[in-house]
Amino acid sequence: MVDHNITTVFDLLRHGEPTGGPMFRGSLDDPLSDTGWQQLNAAIIEGDHWDLIVTSPLMRCQAFARQLAEQRQLPVHEEPQLREIGFGDWEGRTSADIMAHTPDALNRFWNDPLNNPPPGGEAITEFSRRVTAAWQHWQREAAGKRVLVVCHGGVIRMILAEVMGIPLERSFSAIAVPYACRSRIRIDESGHGVLSCLQSHGSHSAF
């Protein structure tokens, strides 16, 4: 039992637009476009304060995370389990392309990814399991600190689903996570237990 209060704050930041524009990327390792860099730089404000940065190993996340860590003189940690969900046969394809060939498959995925994964893609139960494992690890590792996590839309959806009790069937359709979106989660641990809550979600003006 914790005999004093511990507060940990996580800011989840989705990467900006990668080169090639919007598409199902998953494990593809495209770098950020110029627009993507601008989106991420605009998402950070002077008053932001963190003790460390955790990032997905994919270039669209870690390049910015490492630059920011150097600017702010912060430790940065790559977390392999925070890579995006694998989209299988859909990787490298746009929504319009998939809709043109198999429209029902895309609709079914967004409405219930648990039972309608992309062909050859990673099962959402496995995706959720690895993201949740990383989330729990960093809650322990960074207890009492303020942490920036640079990651992916799917990863953020899994963390928010865990925090807010959203069923996996609804995890993709229930939450919009645009490029450079920020979500702040506060975790309070005391002798009465652990309380996790989403404090804000959207642009940095909400912070």
Image: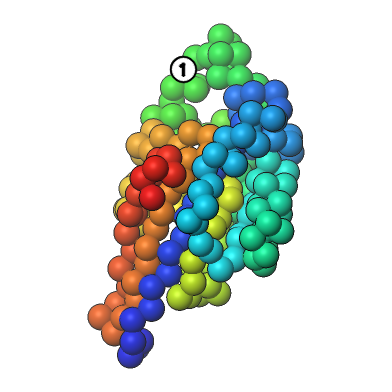
Residue at the spot 32% in from the left edge and 59% down from the top edge: 197
Return the x and y of residue 61 as percentages of the image width and height.
Answer: 65, 46
Return the x and y of residue 201 as percentages of the image width and height.
Answer: 38, 45
> Which element is circle 1 on?
helix
Q: Is residue 46 visible?
A: yes
Among all residues in the image, which is located at the extreme top?
A: 100
The one of 151 and 115 positioned closer to us in this rendering:
151
State the residue position of label 1.
104
> Amino acid under label 1?
Asp
Among all residues in the image, which is located at the extreme front?
A: 46
Q: How many marks?
A: 1
The quarter of the picture where the N terminus appears is: bottom left
Relative to residue 189, is residue 203 depicted above or below?
A: above
The one of 131 and 55 positioned closer to us in this rendering:
55
Relative to residue 7, is residue 26 depicted above or below?
A: above
Residue at the spot 60% in from the left edge and 24% down from the top edge: 22
The one of 50 and 8 positioned closer to us in this rendering:
50
Quadrant of res 177: top left
Q: Is residue 114 visible?
A: no
Quadrant of res 196: bottom left
Among all residues in the image, which is located at the extreme left?
A: 192
Q: Is residue 93 left or right of residue 44?
A: right
Relative to residue 42, is residue 149 depicted above or below?
A: below
Return the x and y of residue 65 as percentages of the image width and height.
Answer: 66, 52
Residue at the spot 45% in from the left edge and 75% down from the top edge: 144
Return the x and y of residue 118 as percentages of the image width and height.
Answer: 57, 31
